[in-house]
Amino acid sequence: MASQQQQSAIKGAKVLMVGAGGIGCELLKTLALSGFEDIHIIDMDTIEVSNLNRQFLFRRSHVGQSKAKVARDAVLRFRPHINISSYHANVKNPEFDVDFFKQFDVVLNGLDNLDARRHVNRLCLAADVPLVESGTTGFLGQVTVHIKGKTECYECQTKPAPKTYPVCTITSTPTKFVHCIVWAKDLLFAKLFGDKNQDNDLNVRSNNSASSSKETEDVFERSEDEDIEQYGRKIYDHVFGSNIEAALSNEETWKNRKRPRPIYSKDILPESRSQQNGSTQNCSVTDGDSTISVMPSLGLKNPQELWGLTQNSLVFIEALKLFFAKRKKEIGHLTFDKDDQLAVEFVTAAANIRAESFEIPLHSLFEAKGIAGNIVHAVATTNAIIAGLIVIEAIKVLKKDDDKYRMTYCLEHPSRKMLLMPIEPYEPNPACYVCSKTPLVLEINTRKSKLRDLVDRIVTAKLGMNLPLIMHGASLLYEVGDDLDDIMVANYNANLEKPLSELPSPIVNGSILTVEDLQQELSCKINVKHREEFDDEKEPEGMVLSGWTQVPATNGESASTSNNEKPADVTESSSGSETASKKRRLSEIEPSNHKKETENVESDDDDIMEVENPMIVSKKKIRVE
């Protein structure tokens, strides 16, 4: 039974939940059953069919409706006396500002993306409101507590950037099935059905040297009178046949690699399928474009069945025909969506044909969809466990039991006979640019890069600022806001197109920028370091952002990395590692040599994608409650 003090803390608490998905549904239910009586929920998503296997507050009749509202209504049916307020909105909207956050006693996160979680972390710091973070992926999960000035904030540790692959590997020398998936999804699908004006690394030129006009023809362009099947075969022969032959002509590439095999449609498929069951007229179409499928017409029923080369080739051609026959209006505007059945079928088939060419093991539709959608299938029991742990930590926060806060990890396999491993929180990282105001270092070509590049690639993408303001000394170079007059907007827009060194207050080597976000009440300094050249393959953005600590002026290297999306080319120097190793858990004085490490795994739909590596956690000194 809960103590009188605990019951009083629970009943009097005003709680904000951000996210009403996999974790959120379990969390709302547990909060209500634990005695919380004033709960507010923010979620911008609507319910999808794929949510129903683990988000038990939702039913099929709710598909398409607001998650926050339906979750509220479901819980009020068995706890009608409590107050639950729902907001079908983005937590980054202006109305959810620092003043909004200040009204709550604790904030509980159940988000599905890094950007939103950073935003909530910063608002909690600015409002001085405790934050309980959480994450699940499959059987793994974690709950962490973040108290301003007492424990590390969510951004104290670098979050790994999503896995990327060199363009040359994707386009020319794939060795893994994921390389084939990336090629099929981000290059081929995008080129055929996406924005025609968008840059694409896929080779689109014909290799037919029969005539000079053919040499410059874009083979992806379809003439109005061109038969759909013939067009599909032309694409098939180009990407799986002639492009492979062109690649083989470079002998140097294949000296130490397996040579791929060109594949042509005439060697795999019958001459024409227009009179067979695979025609577009016999496709499966139900209540929406995203459910169109070629599988029934081809006799393919089991998504976990492995298709052979012929089956993949048939799916490729028939899926392409269906896009033009049934979804022609969408062509030119499509992006890959894991919930779009026809898109998944096309990408699976294309990836498997390419894999066959490069002697890479083929994968089923089920497996390919998981890879293409970055899916780690959610486990409902993990969400329930994590939700319970969130509530336990929230109660400790409300009771101000500082010495009892725990970061708890849910493991797939027992370690020291435990599946739940609690450890004491870490102190704030003195090198964190968010909660410790440590400056950052930006290596950039100040003569070539424009202010727009800095805003788009660094301030917005990496620092996650929504309403940025950039100052150089006393000069205001850029600002975003609704209260700006036309002259100011015109001046700032003009600055965006100027190289950094040609701005009204020139940014050069050694310049110090102040970057602020008034909505998040976040401000940080950026030390600019001019650099002439960048590796196009390893540093495609043409700039490198890293954390900064005082280092000898002779080498000028950054000491640690504090930005959330750490560029692949940035490595921490020895002084950065030393900083990390000096971290302490609360109430500990003995040094720890274990630097906190994380895995970045995208999970299904709306469960958190970042979960700490349990193998690292298991090696840490554990204090069992």
Image: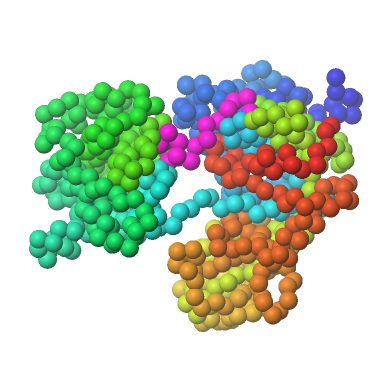
On the image, the x and y values in percent for residue 241 come to: 22, 49
Residue that appears at 60% across and 76% down: 529
Please tell me in which quadrant of the rendered image residue 620 appears: top right
- The number of discs equals 0
Looking at the picture, does residue 451 appear above or below residue 2? below
Which residue shows up at 90% across the image and 25% down it? 4
Residue at 77% in and 56% down: 581
485 lies left or right of 275: right
Residue 191: image location, x then y, percent: 30, 51
Decide if residue 160 is on the left or right side of residue 369: right
Query: In the drawing, does residue 464 fall left or right of residue 170?
Result: right
The colour scheme is rainbow
Q: Nearer the viewer, residue 140 or 581?
A: 581
The quarter holding residue 514 reads: bottom right
Q: Residue at x 19, y 37 (%)?
A: 268
Indicate the position of residue 245 as horizontal and vertical percent values: 23, 54
Q: Which quadrant of the figure contains the N terminus?
A: top right
Q: Quadrant for the C terminus, please.
A: top right
| Region in magenta | 367-383
**521, above or below 266, in the image:** below
Q: Nearer the viewer, residue 529 or 334?
A: 529
Is residue 382 in the magenta section? Answer: yes
Residue 85 visible in the snapshot: no
Q: Residue furthest top?
A: 78
- Residue 526 among magenta residues: no
Q: Is residue 525 above or below residue 589?
A: below
Residue 50 appears in the picture as rendered: yes
Residue 207 placement (x, y as % from top left):
19, 59
